[in-house]
Image (tube, helix red, strand yellow):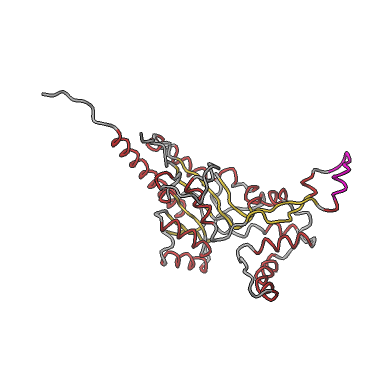
Amino acid sequence: MINPFEQNVIAVIWDFDKTLISDYMQKPIFEHYEVDGNEFWKEVNSLETEYRKRNPDIRINKDTIYLNHFLTCVQQGIFAGLNNQKLREFGSQLNFYPGMPEFLETSRQIIQSNERYKQYSIKVEHYIVSTGLAEMIRGSKVAPYVDGIWGCEFIEDVIQSQLDVKLFPKKDQKKDNENSVISQIGYAVDNTSKTRAIFEINKGANKNPNIDVNSTMDRSKRRVPFEQMIYIADGPSDVPAFSIIKQNGGSTFAVYPKGRMREFQQVDQLRRDGRIDMYGEADYTAGSVTYMWIIHRLEEIADKIAVRKDMAIRQSVSNPPTHIN
């Protein structure tokens, strides 16, 4: 028998930097440690050349090499004592574009309070997939409104100088996490591997650990069909994610900061290239183009789900018996 509540989820998948916030999320870290952010990124951009001087055949991932530079700065004492707890604290300092994070809850409620959609438990889930730092996103004010976060993760190690303190604890000893620093890369997300997160959402691997994202799965069994996804980001670096969503029938939208011609030209080029369906200013307040487009698309998708469920139920139910004349 057909279950009318299967594939009832609409997934809105968000980039983070320059999409939800106006700057790179690492800015509060640089300010705290009095590091010139422009100089940091300049050094990051030079790393590929420096490493190739040592080994011409080495491959460098430009999207995630900054993680290694972060660890170098920790080791050299530039980011002294930086750990995951501090990253969460820095995340709480992030400032979001107008309308965020309220828009996330508003969009969810608009769909889930609709009586027709309630009939099939149609709901909206918000996800963040970023090449930035997952712990900072978890510490930000947007975190309570999202259903999942993909980002880069650091593993901590206890500071060597604190080992004796750990072995011979004193009454005034600080908690272990205060004596730890980030020391290894646990998980890295680049602009191409964002598509893995999309497939995890598609197949439901993020909700059910028994599902391997690489396993073959019939499209009719997948938790969130691609056509029930909306991907929102800010620019050309998100082309792999835009492409996988759009090629499979999903919706794509790009944002740009108000008054910024260069960024406007970038997203307009994405539209002309067929990468995105629409674009608008990074303003999520009621009445803005971005607000209205996303809400309208959510309602369109919800309508299609409801129609599909109606048809499925009608087809599964036989006609009632009638009197024979």
For the point 79% across and 50% down, which residue is it? Answer: 158
How many discs mark residues in the rendered view?
0
In the image, residue 45 above or below residue 256: below
- Asked whether 177 or 53 is in front, the reply is 53
Residue 61: % across, % down: 61, 65
Residue 303: % across, % down: 36, 43
Q: Would residue 319 be found to the left or right of residue 57 on screen?
A: left
For the point 59% across and 43% down, which residue is it? Answer: 144
Res 48 → quadrant? bottom right
- Asked whether 126 or 160 is in front, the reply is 160
In the image, residue 299 above or below residue 24: above
Q: Would residue 101 be found to the left or right of residue 54 on screen?
A: left
Quarter in which the N terminus is drawn? top left
Residue 10: % across, % down: 45, 45
User: In the rendered structure, which segment of residues is drawn in magenta?
Assistant: 162-173
In the image, residue 20 above or below residue 208: below
Res 190 → quadrant? bottom right
Q: Would residue 294 be found to the left or right of residue 56 on screen?
A: left
Q: Would residue 18 be found to the left or right of residue 290 on screen?
A: right
Residue 165 falls within the magenta-colored stretch? yes
Quarter in which the C terminus is drawn? top left
For this orientation, the residue located farthest to the front is 216
- Asked whether 87 or 216 is in front, the reply is 216
Residue 178: % across, % down: 78, 47
